[in-house]
Amino acid sequence: MINECECRSDVNLALWSKGEWREEQVKCADFLCQDPEDLQWPCHAEGEVVIIMAKANRIRNCASCRESFIRRLHMPQLWWSDTYKRMNGYFGTESRRNAEGVIESYSTWSRALVKHFDPLSMPMADFDIQYRWLKLNLFTRWIKPRKMVILAFDPVGIIQDRLFGMLLQRLGREELHDPYWPYTRILEELVALQGTTVWSLRDLIRTTELSPSRDHRNLQGKPKYNYSRLHDIARHAIHISETLDLSVRLSESVIEEHKQLMSSISDIDPRGPIENPQQIKHALYDTCSRLAFFNHALFSLRCRSTSNNQRLNNEIQLRFHTDSQYDSQASIEINHSTKSDSASMRWIAIVSLVFLPANLVSSIFSTTFFDVTNDMVSVTKDFWIYWVVLVAVTAVTLAFWFYLPRLTTEERVRQPSPSDMWPGTKKSLRSLAYGLKGERSNLDSATWA
């Protein structure tokens, strides 16, 4: 028993039939209110392709709508979990067969993220790079013989504006027999979005490479590089490489599953009324070739993204080494200045040493211990006081000069270590080490037992 809808959320519908399509907006409760046992096709009977735009979080938080989507569209329960909500990309399939082994329905779910940059903020070095995440979060359900439901969750920005035209352009009736026909449009749009992102980042790196401050021969002073911006660009480059890896993997998974489906193509419409079997077969092979082309295009963009990362790392290393080279040159100049100052101080010391004996002699003879009378120089009997004081002061000075540096060193050695400040720390760490060693021994004995 399904409870009454609490979210009252709306979904946008695009219904395609016989080459024409129309749009409307309905409530989730009204759209999926039928009993799933009444009709396998959950939409209007006259529609061949139905595109639904819905808010995933509202449906996820509404038990009634979530259960209705699971029952009417046969969506997997695990899709609604938070684990897959946080993922950057995935792809899955599920088919339903009748008692004779004939495929009656084929479901796929996929997710891809693209980091889209604001072109106005890219060339401005003084402003942060503005960006937004574009999301392709799709669920498709193909119903024999050629009906398709495409459910797009939370399309934003240019995705929402281009989704209807992207999926319905140049749509032929023969393609509707292939459950993977939407992915020729989805991968084409994914290639376009990823290409715009990769080349926007390439232009930004190229602008950095052409900066006048890049060449150290043009520098008049210490270079002032904006390392924060360079590392910000590197962060975006890492995200782009991550999403591109997942996009390439998604396209490879689509191709693998489509080839498996083609190998059992007779299981789709065996003995059924087909207008032109040869055209349908060609349509399937055309879909396969286009999927392979878009896979190669995504791989090419992945190679370009790798090149962008390497060029950006090269620029960061170049600027770092340019800074280091400038600092080294400044250190050499300081060293030369220090040598010049040392030479000057040496000459000053030599001059002082030359005049020091004369200064000492004149100081001694200028004391009151000497008396000059009648052209005779006499020394008082108290002259010994001078020598006693001189020897005492010299001894004290030499003692301070010898012992003071050693006292300072001993104080630094005696400063308490963290283990001395917390006596139990060393013991606790030793006990923890013994405990871990014992657990490891027990684990080894259990492993080899």
Image: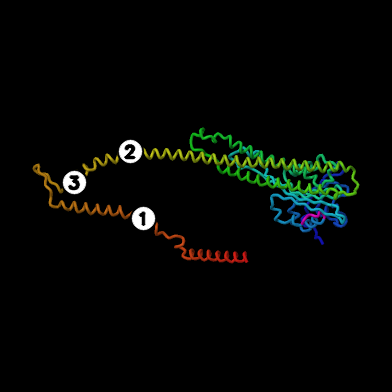
> Residue 97 appears in which quarter of the rendering?
bottom right
Label 3 vs label 2, nearer the camera: 2
**Along the polypeptide, which appears first: circle 3 or circle 1?**
3
- Magenta run includes residue 74: yes
Q: Position of residue 48 (x, y in %)?
A: 86, 46
Residue plotted at (62% across, 64% down): 448
Residue marked by disc 2: 344
Residue marked by disc 1: 408
Quarter of the image for the N terminus: give it. Answer: bottom right
Q: Dot 2, crowdedness within 10 Å: few (<14), some or many (≥20)?
A: few
**Along the polypeptide, which appears first: circle 1 or circle 2?**
2
Q: Which residues are magenta?
A: 72-76
Furthest residue toward left: 374
Q: Secondary structure at mark 1?
A: helix
**Along the polypeptide, which appears first: circle 3 or circle 2?**
2
Front-most of 91 and 258?
258
Front-most of 387 and 61?
387
In this rendering, position of residue 95 left or right of residue 376: right
Q: Position of residue 144 (x, y in %)?
A: 86, 50
In this rendering, position of residue 351 left or right of residue 300: left
- Under mark 2, the amino acid is Ser
Q: Secondary structure at mark 2?
A: helix
